[in-house]
Every structure is written in structure tokens, then in C-alpha cells.
Amino acid sequence: MFCMECYHLSGLLWDAITEMDEHNRPIHTFQVCNVMEPNQNNWLRSNWISRQAAQKVYVELRFTLRDCNSIPWVSGTCKETFNLFYHETDEAHGVKFRPAQYTKIDTIAADESFTQMDLGDRILKLNTEVREVGPINRKGFYLAFQDIGACIALVSVRVYYKKCPFTLRNLASFPDTVPRVDSSSLVEVRGACVDHAEERDTPKLFCGADGDWLVPLGRCVCSVGYEEIDACRPGFYKAYAGNIKCSKCPPHSFSYGDASAICRCEKGFFRAEKDPPTMACTRPPSPPRNLIFNLNDTCLLLEWSPPSDTGGRRDLTYNVQCKRCGPEPDHCQLCEDELRFLPGPLGLTNATVTVMDFSAHANYTFEIESLNGVSDMSSRRNPATSQPQQSPSLVGTLKKDWASPNSIALSWQQPEQTTLPIIDYEVKYYEKVLKYSVYDSKAPSVIVSGLKPATWYVFSVRTRTAAGYSSYSPKYEYETTGDCKYLRPSTVLISSNMASDQGQVLVIVTAAVGGFTLLVILTLFLLITGSEYFTTYVDPDTYEDPTQAVHEFTKEIDPSRIRIERVIGAGEFGEVCSGRLRTPGKKEIAVAIKTLKGGYVERQRRDFLREASIMGQFDHPNIIRLEGVVTKSRPVMIVVEYMENGSLDSFLRQHDGHFTVIQLVGMLRGIASGMKYLSDMGYVHRDLAARNILVNSNLVCKVSDFGLSRVLEDDPEAAYTTTGGKIPIRWTAPEAISYRKFSSASDAWSYGIVMWEVMSYGERPYWEMSNQDVILSIEEGYRLPAPMGCPVALHQLMLHCWQKERNHRPKFTDIVSFLDKLIRNPSTVLKNFFLPESPGEEMDYPMFISVGDWLDSIKMSQYKSNFMAAGYNTLDSVARMSIEDVRRIGVELIGHQRRIISSIQTLHLQLLHEHEKGFHV
Ligand code: ADE
């Protein structure tokens, strides 16, 4: 309560009275009750109130007013209202009270909503009234209360203004902000980045009239060396600004203090100028090994093995140094300039060099030095010793045990071991015209699969012992047998049996070489199935009169044949209902009815019917069927077949974990088949997503929501891009987001996302990441990891759909064939992908060669050192890890634990389980 001054202009004064409430606490009130006398004019004035930053203030009054009927003999003089006034002024003191200067705010009457207040033996109704005052332009104001003959007790006066309070949003701080007086306009406030954060897009908030912050725009991101909550701890770093976490220092580097932008290399390790801060520190390589020479007429061929330690880098090169020495061994001079080296003496990338143009009767010594990108930074030099080493024994001639068009089994005699035991053999093979591959084998035999038919290959083997590698065995050349089905597909028809045999071979190949082979499988099936559809889709917009397209592609239904039963949803144009459709001579069927709500303009009617003109051109079991339209009476309607289970995304969320992998694949197969039909017709959907797939009572999935740009208007997921288009970012291929290149290949990308939605039972793609972050992460190469329990074969197909280069994505026809194969023969496919061929055999992981690669692929690279330090350095050991193990090795964030475990399960457990279950649909 403000201090109040009382003014008696005529009649009696307001009295300051202290009473006790029901809890015996004092209540200070101002009271007046001159109800017997006519013409009352009693004033009560507050002291000066500073308006502070406000332009508009609120005055909350709590008071009691006696009902005149409750006081006898007062009719005519008793009043039940009083008046509230204010006067603006800059002067806080010495202002005389002159009622004429005051502006009336309102007449205050007792409200109906009241609480009872017990003032002694009187029960009175406590009223609360709030009035707005303003705009106020002077520094402050007085309030005044005019009594004109009522019985009032003023219990409290609260004066306040509203503000949007200081807040932190998107790492920017926004100060206390007072809203505008005009309640319809917002105050735009620019945020300041918090310490150790920097602006990405100018952070802004808008302060609304009621003191609420609205529409956050832009953001700040953590500076280098900082993550959201804190500075990076010692041992961690953050090299780039952005809302990403600090990462553990890469191998062979460290950070002592907080907030490191980069980790420093351990002693003896270095970073080359162009190495990114995320890369491990590396060191110069160890010397080359097993230097051997071959003298042939005037040519000297020097060959050596790569160093056992490349220093952790791939930019390995060799320099050759030549010394010509006289009879005295210390009388040597450099001789590179005198000789000819092929390809040259320096910067060699292959471990061989030919030397020519020797002088007669001279004594030459050659030193081979291995170098890499950090050799210059170290004093460590490493010429290969010219001393002959105790090299491991050479493997003899290779023998072919058996071969197929795609594989070969080779064996060799185990060399007589003299000193050190053989660790393993390295089998090198290459297509005579292509780059080579290397296999490690513990036994003196190997099966190399994934070979191309009718292609020349060269194989050789070398032994490894603790002393290093032996030289390679003599080369063994072999041409795989021809496969005319593969080579000349257009001229050969394959029966389904043959195709399935072929498929088995290819599947084994897939297990060995991963993604590439998938393409082969898909290509093969493309050739088998061929094209079945010849009609092409006609865009209704090409009709000058769109009603013409409606006539051409849809059937008019007499509304008397339709019975609407229930409203099942809301579309952009009106309600969606379920009902029944009668057709003479046919069984009544369940239908969904989309209605166009009244009051539409011609453009809306045209857009509404556009979808029917498109749908009416399609006839496929996996495309929602149009029954007809009602255009000649109101409401205008589109009638389609009824899909009992509604949209696929919510259906899956409601049935989380209920289906077998093969049931899910069956759904995906249906969608792919519908999409194949659409792409064969030349129709690009642009909004393929689980929410736009409908499911019937037999779990048949059908593609719905047609209408090109219109569908995007209707889709709550569609967001405006910087170029102004409205696009469902998470489902859309990068080229369609960036430059609106929509095609069946961009639909294939969306199909991959639908696969992910299905296999994760309706999880939101990219979870809670913002659209902007999704775009950035895709650009940086991130792809969604396999959902929990998703077979690798399916995840590989997803990854195939998410190739950046759109021509590399599979065609829908390939996808259908691949999924058919999976459904027809699940055990074969899954067995070859995930399970050891026989007990005790190593598992075959098609995509990843090391734990590091696997962690990279699921974007968990920061935990590489945790896995290594805890001894999990093979995928086999990782596949046996439990969530406790993952926690124990230091993966603290629950999201990361989940991602890792879900990927581990993908690698192993779930698949084993699925295999045992036998895949019943
Ligand atoms: N919601 C929208 N279209 C539908 C359909 N055809 N069946 C069931 N629910 C739907």
C-alpha cells in the first residue's frame, strides 16, 4: 500500500483504520462511509509513484463496498461506486492536490466475484479490480480515489507494469524488456551471445504485450574450446565453434588446461600443417624393410616392404640415396645425379625403383628412406639398413583348389620355418587392370570371394613373422570363368530358379565386399524384371481447364450412394470422414471421404480436386485407390478406399516392437512397389514419408497424399527453405532442398528415410535435431545409423538410398527386387550377412574393417580411445558388449550409450535371434 493523503473537499474524510483479519493479523485500510449525507466528495490521494521504464501501468484495487440495501434509512444518499483518477507529473514532491488536474480512469463498482472477509462482526465481500493506466509520458503519477457517498474500505492498491523478463535462449541473453503500449505490436530484441559463444544467425526474440517472449530466431553457438555447459575439461578439446560437445583428445595428443581449442601432440608425435585438429598426432615411419635387389643386364631393380610402422599416416613416400665408394669405405660420394632412376629417386609412392646407367667397376650403396608428412618435423631418420635381415621364409607356388565365376580357393605349402613362428599370411590380389586388395589369412589357404566373372586376377602371398614380412611368392594368375548372364544381360533370359541361384552367389559376395555388391545385386534384378508399365502420368496443370482433367480421370459419384459415418481427421481443405459407398450390383464398401469445406474460392476447389485428378490416373495395389468424386453438388468430395489402420507412422508408434523383421520388410516392399509404379508412370511424389502412407487391415501399405506443391502446403513437417520453398527437410534429398531438383531419385532418398522410420517403429528421423542441423550434418556426410534390431542388409539399402550423388541411388525396381529376395529367402541372406559360417569361425562384417571404422560410421569416433583402452579392439569383442560394458568404458551420455548398443545389436544379437525364429510373416 502506498502512503495515502486524504482530502476532504466536502463532507467527511477517509479514515486510516487498522482492523484484524481472521488470523488476527492487522489489515491497514482506508475507509469512508458517509452514506447518510447527500453530495459527498471525499478524496484520497496516493503519494507520487515513479513510472520507471513503463509506459503502461496496471492498478489492482482490493476493497469492500457495502450494499446500500443492507443499511436502513439511506436510500437517495447511499452510493455503491467510487471513482479512480490519475495525474502525471515529473515532480515527485510539493505538488498541491487540485482535483481538476486529475484524469478519470474509471468508475469502480463491486464485482460479482468476491471472497468473504470477516471484519469483526461484519461479513463483507472483498473485490479485486484491475485497471490499465497509460500511456504515461511523465516521470511519475499520482492516483486518487473519489468517494461520492459509498461505504468503502480500501484494503490494498498494487501498481505494477509488465515486462518480458531477462532470459537465455539459444546461448544468447535477452534483457528485461518492457512491451509496447500498443498491444498489437511486438518489441524486437537482439540477444547478446553469452560468454564463450558466438553469433551464427543474429539471435532475436520478440516481446509481446503480456510480457511473454515470442518467436525465437537465430542463435549463438559455443566458441572453440567450449561446450554448452562448460569449458572443455583437460583431455578434451573443441576445435570448431558450434553446439557440439568437446571431444576427447585424438590419440597421441593431450590438453592440460580447460577450454582447449586443440590438443598438443605428445613428445615424438606431430601434426602436419594441413592435418585437422581432429586427427591423431603422428610420427615419422619406421624404416622400410626387406630391401632386395635384382640385377638384370644394366638395370638394378630395388624392391622393399613398407615400414612396419607408418607412423599413423597414409602419405608414405620413399627417397633413394646412392653412394659410390672408393676402395676406402669412408671415401664415398653421393651419386643420384650420375644415375637414372625410374620413376625417380625421391618421393616414390611404390616400394620399388629401377636404377640404370651405372659406371663400370664402381661400388654402389643404396639407402631407402621412408618418409611421411611429419618427417620434416622430427630428427628421426630411417634409411633402410643395407644389412640383410633374417627375413621370413618365402611361400612357394600357389595352387587353385576350386573356383567359381566370383570366387577362388587357393592354397600353398607352409614354408619350413627356421627361427620365428609364422603369424599369418598376407594374400595380395588384384585385377590385372585395377587396384589391389589384401587379405590376412592364418591358414596356408584362402577363399577370395567377390571377384568379377571373366576377369584376370593376379594373386601372391607372403608370410609374416615377428621379424616382418617375407617377399611375395611368385605370382599366380587366374581368369575367373565367364558369366554370360552377367556380361550380356539383354540377350539372356534367366528363369526364376536360375536367378535365385545367382542370387545366392551374389549374396555371399555382398557379405565380403559390402555396399558395392549391393549395387550388383540390384543391377542384376533390374535386368531380370524389366519394365511393366507403359502409361505415363499427365499433370492436371497442363490442362487449360482443370475441370477437364477432373472429368477425364475421375468418376462422378451420386451423393445418395455415399453414407458418411464419422469424422476421422482434418485435411487442409476440410474434414476427412469414414463412411460407406454403395454401387449398384456390387458389395457396399468402406470408404474415406475428403470434403471441401464451404466458403471456398475457385482456386481452392481446383487445388482440392487436383489430387483426385492425379490419383484417378493410378491403378496399383500399393497406391490409394480413388473411388470417385462429388463435384455436382455440395459439399464437394473425394472418395477413396478406406484404410483401417490409418497412417503408417502412428500405426507403428502404437505397435512398437510388435512385428517381425519380415513383416516390416513386407510393408516396405509394398511401399517400394507403389513407388516403382509411380516412377514408371513418371510421377515424382516429393513428400514420401511414413505419415503419407496408409495401412489397411491386412497390413498392406499404400502411398497416398498426391498433389505436388499442394501436398507440401498441407504437410506440417514442411518448412520454408532460404530459397522460399516449403520442404519436409528430414525426408528430402539434398539436391531437392538446395536447388529443388525433385526426381524419382530424390523420392528414393525419401524412401530410405521411410525405411528408417519403419525399422525404428515410427521414430522421428534425426530425433530432436533442428532442420538446420540436419542439413549441415547430411552435408558433412552423417547418415542415420541402423535402428535397433535392423539387419545390416536393410541399413545398407538405406545408405544406398542416401548417396549424395543421386544417380548412384537404387531405382525403385531394384529396391523391390532386393526386398523380394529378402522375403523369399530371409535365412540365406541374413545368415550370410551376419552369422559365422560355422561355429568358431570369425564373423564376417561386410561394412567395417575395424572398431574405429565402425565408430566412425555411427558418428561415435570420440570413443575410439575408450574402446581401445578397455581392450575392445575387434568387432567380435565389441559384439559381445552389454550396455554396462559400454558405460564402464566411459560412455556417459545416455543417447550415445543407446546409439552404440543399438548398433552393436545390429551387428550381432538381434539377427541371431531373428535367424532362430525362422522369419514367419
Ligand atoms: N485418413 C486419410 N485417408 C484415409 C483413408 N483412406 N483411410 C483411413 N484413414 C484415412
Image: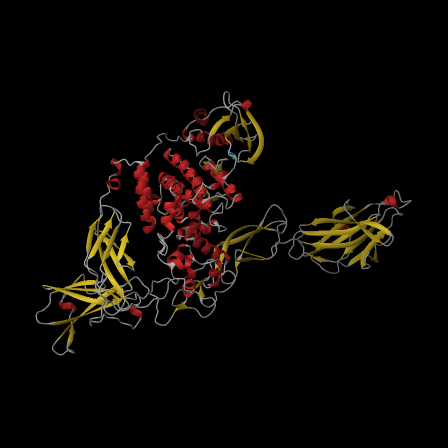
In the visual, does 746 lie left or right of 8? left
Q: Quadrant of the N terminus?
A: bottom right
Q: Nearer the viewer, residue 217 or 728?
A: 728
Residue occupying the far top of the picture: 585
Residue 333 in the image: state x and y as whole percent.
Answer: 15, 74
Percent x, y of residue 609: 48, 30
User: Residue at horizontal 45%, vertical 31%?
Assistant: 615
Residue placed farthest to the front in the image?
Answer: 839
Query: Which residue is most to the left?
Result: 360
- Does residue 373 appear left or right of residue 789 in this picture? left
83 sits to left or right of 37: left
Position above or below: 503 against 567: below
Query: Quadrant of residue 502 in the image?
Result: top left
Task: Tally the numbered discs.
Answer: 0
Instruction: Name the spot of residue 288 as percent of width and height, x first.
Output: 24, 67
- Asked if one can make out residue 192 in the rendered structure from this viewpoint, the answer is yes
Q: Nearer the viewer, residue 313 or 271?
A: 313
- If the image is split into quadrants, where does the C terminus sit? top left
Above or below, comparing residue 463 to residue 899 in the picture: below
Q: Is residue 890 above or below residue 209?
A: below
User: In the rendered view, does 154 fall on the left or right side of 559?
Assistant: right
The foreground one among 706 and 618 is 618
> Is residue 652 placed above or below 440 in the rendered structure?
above
Instruction: List x then y, in percent, for residue 675.
Output: 40, 37
Q: Quick check: can you spot residue 199?
A: no
